[in-house]
Amino acid sequence: MVYTLLIMHYTVKQVAKISGVSVRLLHYYDEIGLLKPSFIKENGYRYYEEKELLQLQQILFFRELEFPLEQIKKIMKSPQFNSLHALIDQQKLLELKKQRVEGMLITINKTINALKGGGSMTNDDTFSAFNDPTYQKYRDEVQERWGHTDAYKQSMERVGKMSKDDLERVKAEAEDITQTTAELMKKEFSFNSVEVQKQVDRFYQHLHHFYEPSYELFKGLGQMYVDDPRFTKVYEKRAEGFAAFMRDAMAFYADAHLRK
């Protein structure tokens, strides 16, 4: 007797019904390369197998955890991606999110009672549910762990080959570049001045210790100094407005080279 392995195939409509997402959304995931069907028949019908259903489940978990689609794509296309480990991370994040939501419900109930005359609330009571960094911190760690870009991998490889003295020298160089640029800003040099752009060029060359930066990546790095509060805080300690100054200086430098 010959036994054959039965592989289930699902149409787009069937997957939509099983998962609760729309057919249009599944088509969109296909278009952007996030979730491709297992195969497409000559009549144009898309068919999915169990492995695609599992991928869709993980996409929906990431979406529930408010990961942007582009980040989900990077995570799931990473060579280091492991479905089981990702599910464990998602479980932990959902548990943290549950705790956060429960805290918000307590805060809402306290606020309702206070507004009805049932007592007063301190500022800590009002915002404590929103001021818990645990969920965001773990989420950032998950993004970093799974969302390995080529630059990140290059950085890990190159840093791993550096001696302690090499690391100290690179760190000192970065400190000198940052401090010199901050001092120039304080002296009211403009972000596109020759003096400032010289330091920006030093910074661009400095990044080669870790990875090969494109000018687009360099410009995006500068934008992150403003968009990411953690980076903004570090740069603002140097001087008020320094994060935006670095963004503008790096964008000017990148655009000048991209035009060549």
Image (cartoon, rainbow, N blue to C red):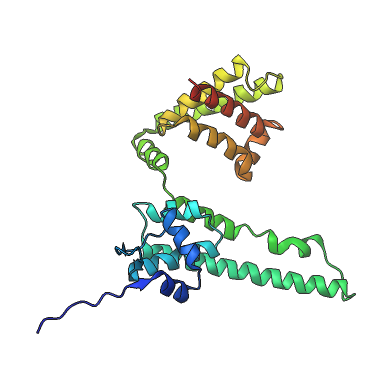
State the image coordinates of residue 177 (x, y, percent, origin top left): 55, 24
- For the residue pair 47 and 41, the one nearer the viewer reads as 41
For the question of whether residue 173 can be seen, the reply is no
Report the side of 90 relative to 114 (left or right): left
Residue 111 position within the rendered picture, expressed as x and y whole percent measured from the top left: 81, 70
- As drawn, the residue found furthest toward the left would be 1
Q: Is residue 115 left or right of residue 242?
A: right
- Residue at the (45%, 76%) spot, across then down: 18
**Quarter of the figure with residue 224:** top right
129 relative to 217, above or below: below
Q: Residue at x 35, y 68 (%)?
A: 48
Q: Nearer the viewer, residue 36 or 27?
A: 27
Q: Residue, x 86% and y 69% (percent of image)?
A: 120
Of the pair 140 and 69, the residue shown nearer to us: 69
| Nearest to the observer: residue 127 or residue 258 | 258
The answer, for residue 130, to whether it is visible in the render is yes
Q: Is residue 153 above or below residue 82?
A: above
Residue 183 sits in which quadrant? Answer: top right
What residue lies at 60% left-to-right and 19% top-to-bottom?
196
Residue extending furthest toward the right: 117
Residue 38 in the image: x percent, y percent?
32, 64
